[in-house]
């Protein structure tokens, strides 16, 4: 893409600093189209997050009906799982699902046969809210510790765009970390529940101890 094409698309002003053209050329080199750039500029008023956004949602995107067809489940059942997992409602023509979600919903269906619908939906809600918190923590980590520093030192849009893309690429390391941490925490939880149910008086009853730590010396005053 050329400067003339960027200008014709309303993305570039020759009077703007050279860094703007550098950003546009870098985005084009990442495979970003003029249509993508125009849409991001109109929607967000900035292009620094565009390469990261496209990397995050790379690959095929499916509608609700397509996910249902591939998974062999009804759209209504998919919608139920989707809402339980803390995702927003999806319109019939929206392409928000990736192929990985087909396997995710299929695994939910298999687990439902084992645990029952009600208990599984409760677990999915816990899982969805927990993952949402992890996602928010990841975004906050970037905004507070990377983007803020780039903005404070007056770096270019290109520097911010490159950092944004790098942060998205680092997300691929999280699933392995979560898997290892989850399995370790499951092992700890199993030991804790076994110890709490040592007497086995009732299957749904455990013996726990609640402790209070006085950090301000209030106990001696009461």
Image (cartoon, rainbow, N blue to C red):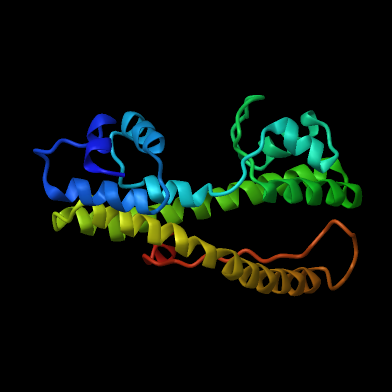
Left/right placement of residue 180 relative to residue 21 reads: right
> Which residue of the protein is positioned furthest toward the top in this rendering?
92
Left/right placement of residue 61 relative to residue 8 reads: right
Q: Position of residue 108 (x, y in %)?
A: 79, 48
Seen from the viewer's position, the closer of residues 116 and 80 is: 80
User: Where 39 sits versus 153, above or below?
Assistant: above
Q: Position of residue 113 (x, y in %)?
A: 91, 48
Q: Position of residue 112 (x, y in %)?
A: 85, 47
User: Who's the residue at 40% across and 34% down the image?
Assistant: 35
User: Who's the residue at 82% across and 68% down the image?
Assistant: 197
Q: Position of residue 134 (x, y in %)?
A: 52, 55
Seen from the viewer's position, the closer of residues 213 and 142 is: 142
Where the N terminus falls, by quadrant? Answer: top left
User: Who's the residue at 61% across and 71% down the image?
Assistant: 181
Locate residue 210: give its quadrant. bottom right
Seen from the viewer's position, the closer of residues 57 and 183 is: 57
User: Where 84 sits versus 200, above or below?
Assistant: above
- Total count of labels: 0
Where the C terminus falls, by quadrant? Answer: bottom left
User: Where 179 sits versus 59, above or below?
Assistant: below
Left/right placement of residue 193 relative to residue 22 reads: right
Locate residue 144: give its quadrant. bottom left
Locate residue 196: give its quadrant. bottom right
User: Who's the residue at 31% across and 42% down the image?
Assistant: 47
């Amino acid at each position: 893409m050329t400067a003339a094409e960027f200008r014709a698309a309303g993305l570039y002003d020759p009077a703007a600093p050279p860094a703007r053209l550098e950003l546009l050329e870098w985005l084009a080199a990442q495979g970003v189209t003029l249509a993508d750039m125009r849409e991001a500029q109109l929607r967000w008023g900035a292009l620094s997050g565009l390469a990261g956004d496209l990397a995050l949602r790379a690959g095929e995107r499916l509608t609700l009906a397509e996910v249902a067809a591939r998974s062999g489940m009804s759209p209504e059942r998919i919608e139920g799982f989707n809402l339980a997992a803390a995702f927003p409602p999806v319109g019939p023509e929206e392409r928000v699902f990736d192929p990985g979600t087909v396997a995710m919903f299929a695994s939910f269906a298999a687990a439902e046969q084992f645990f029952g619908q009600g208990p599984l939906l409760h677990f999915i809600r816990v899982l969805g809210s927990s993952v949402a918190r992890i996602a928010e923590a990841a975004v906050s980590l970037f905004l507070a510790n990377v983007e803020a520093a780039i903005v404070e030192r007056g770096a270019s849009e290109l520097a911010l765009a490159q950092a944004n893309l790098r942060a998205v690429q680092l997300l691929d390391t999280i699933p392995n970390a979560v898997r290892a941490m989850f399995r370790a925490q499951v092992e700890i939880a199993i030991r804790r529940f076994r110890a709490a149910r040592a007497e086995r008086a009732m299957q749904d009853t455990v013996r726990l101890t609640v402790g209070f730590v006085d950090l301000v010396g209030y106990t001696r005053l009461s």
